[in-house]
Image (cartoon, grey):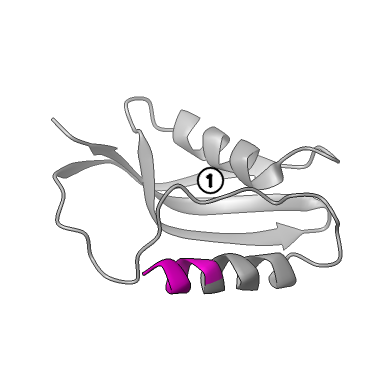
C-alpha cells in the first residue's frame, strides 16, 4: 500500500509539469473500495485554484468540498490543469456518523 501511494504521488509530480513547488499531498488513497460508512452529499463537485505559488491541489480540493456543505471528503477524484489553473472534480461525501 505504501509503495502504491509513493508511486501515485510520483506520477502526480511528473504529470504536473515542470513547476518546482509542492503540488500538495493526499491524506489517503486507495485503488479499491474502502468499507467505511459514508453518505454522498453532492454527486459532482469542482474546485479550482489559479493562484500562482500557492498549494493548488489543497486549495482546489478545499473549494470543491466547500461547494457541498456538510461534506468532509472527496471520492472518485480527478484533477487536471487548464492553462495555469488546477481543477479538482469528484464526489463529495460525509464520512462517519
Image side of residue 19 versus residue 34, left or right: right
Magenta span includes 61: no
Taking the spot 62% from the left edge, 73% from the top edge, the residue there is 11
Image side of residue 75 versus residue 35, left or right: right
The C terminus: image quadrant:
top left
Taking the spot 13% from the left edge, 44% from the top edge, the residue there is 37
Q: Picture coordinates of residue 56 (x, y %)?
A: 70, 44
Q: Picture coordinates of residue 53 (x, y %)?
A: 84, 40
The N terminus: image quadrant:
bottom left
Question: Which stretch appears magenta?
Answer: 1-6
- Please tell me which residue lies in front, 59 or 46: 59
Q: Picture coordinates of residue 10 (x, y %)?
A: 63, 70
Residue on which disc 1 sits: 46
Q: Secondary structure at mark 1?
A: strand
- Please tell me which residue lies in front, 90 or 27: 27
Taking the spot 70% from the left edge, 65% from the top edge, the residue there is 13
Amino acid at each position: 500500500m505504501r509503495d502504491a501511494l509513493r508511486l501515485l504521488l510520483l506520477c502526480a509530480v511528473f504529470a504536473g509539469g515542470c513547476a518546482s513547488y509542492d503540488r500538495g499531498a493526499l491524506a489517503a488513497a486507495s485503488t479499491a473500495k474502502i468499507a467505511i460508512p459514508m453518505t454522498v452529499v453532492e454527486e459532482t463537485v469542482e474546485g479550482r485554484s489559479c493562484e500562482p505559488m500557492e498549494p493548488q491541489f489543497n486549495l482546489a480540493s478545499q473549494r470543491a468540498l466547500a461547494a457541498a456543505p456538510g461534506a468532509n471528503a472527496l471520492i472518485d477524484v480527478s484533477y487536471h490543469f487548464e492553462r495555469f489553473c488546477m481543477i479538482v472534480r469528484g464526489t463529495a461525501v460525509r464520512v462517519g456518523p
